[in-house]
Amino acid sequence: MNRFEGKVVIITGAGNGMGKAAAHRFASEGAIVVLADLYQDALDKVHSELNSSKTLSVKTDVSNEAEVKNLIEQTIKNFNKIDILINNAGVHIPGTILDGSIQDWEKISSVNINGAIYCSKYALPHLIESKGCIVNNASVSGLGADWGAAYYCVSKGAIVNLTRVLALDFGLQGVRVNSVCPSLVKTNMTNSWPDDIRNKFNERIPLGRAAEPEEVAAVMSFLASDDASFVNGVNLPVDGGVTASDGQPKIV
Ligand code: NAD
Ligand code: ADP
Ligand code: HBR
């Protein structure tokens, strides 16, 4: 399939995990991909795996407004338009509100919330022009709460409602906004979590396993494609069935 031939896609956090998988997925369907990440070495590696004439890397800290403006400017300068924004960059720091420091909150809120706000704000005028779309990477941790991940869950709750408010405010101008809400995905963010925690996740996920990053990237590409032309304001679980549970314990 070449659903994204001629489309310009910005992917934040493209150096690793789901962002990297998304870069490969969109490129494999014909897109011009603009890779944004904090780390130049990670960007260089992903860039080298793609068709370089259809790839631009812009080292960007999404929590820095000036760097986000530069990301948008570089994209327009090189490709003249933006069709799709994937707000994927994110960080996770565990802890209750008592365990976590104010610096932890500042880090999580500045990357996970401010990053998505800045990218959306500065990409939207171009998305209105192209009648494009946004796909956010939220989490099931934004649809409900997890024990011991207070700041992270608050940040992901904000992304879930950012998805809804943008869908309402810009639908009439032809811009769709949706999110994916993964449960545990095998990426750097979670690979170092101890086996006993990973096993507990596997017990709670009806499919009995964590997701591969490519399984989430596939859903991002669906939401960004014309196949989802009437899907708007949806926070779509990509969670192996976790949110099908009402939360009561497994007794069988
Ligand atoms: P990852 O750590 O593999 O990738 C995250 C990428 O974001 C990294 O390349 C990192 O350098 C980049 N990044 C971090 N801070 C940044 C910043 N300020 N500016 C630009 N880039 C920055 O993690 P991942 O699991 O692929 O995470 C992607 C998204 O998925 C995150 O928003 C995360 O919260 C969300 N998510 C992850 C899981 C999971 O289980 N891994 C589950 C649900 C949602
Ligand atoms: P953490 O405290 O989780 O390491 P960081 O913001 O430093 O938080 O890094 C987040 C993610 O960025 C890491 O999980 C890893 O995927 C990626 N990362 C960190 N350092 C580098 C690096 N030097 N090169 C490429 N990716 C990196
Ligand atoms: C585990 C999952 O909910 C996350 C890191 O977002």
Image: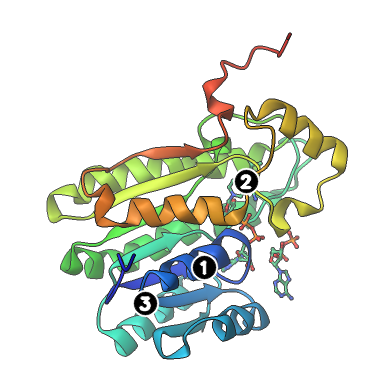
Residue 228, position in %: x, y? 27, 48
The residue lying at 43 percent from left, 77 percent from top is 34
> Is residue 13 in sight in this rendering?
no
**Residue identifier under label 3:** 72
What is the distance, in whole Å, between disc 3 and disc 1 at their CAs? 11 Å
Q: Earlier in the sequence, mark 3 or mark 1?
A: 1
The residue lying at 33 percent from left, 56 percent from top is 224
The residue lying at 27 percent from left, 63 percent from top is 124
Residue 57, position in %: x, y? 50, 83
Which label lies toward us, 3 or 2? 2
Q: Please determine whether, in this image, residue 85 is positioned above or below residue 136.
A: below
Q: Is residue 28 left or right of residue 245?
A: left
Q: Residue 211 got which mark?
A: 2
Mark 1 vs ligand 1: CB under 8 Å?
yes
Location of residue 153 by image quarter: top right
Residue kind at label 2, given as amino acid type: Ala
**Residue identifier under label 1:** 62
Location of residue 235 by image quarter: top left
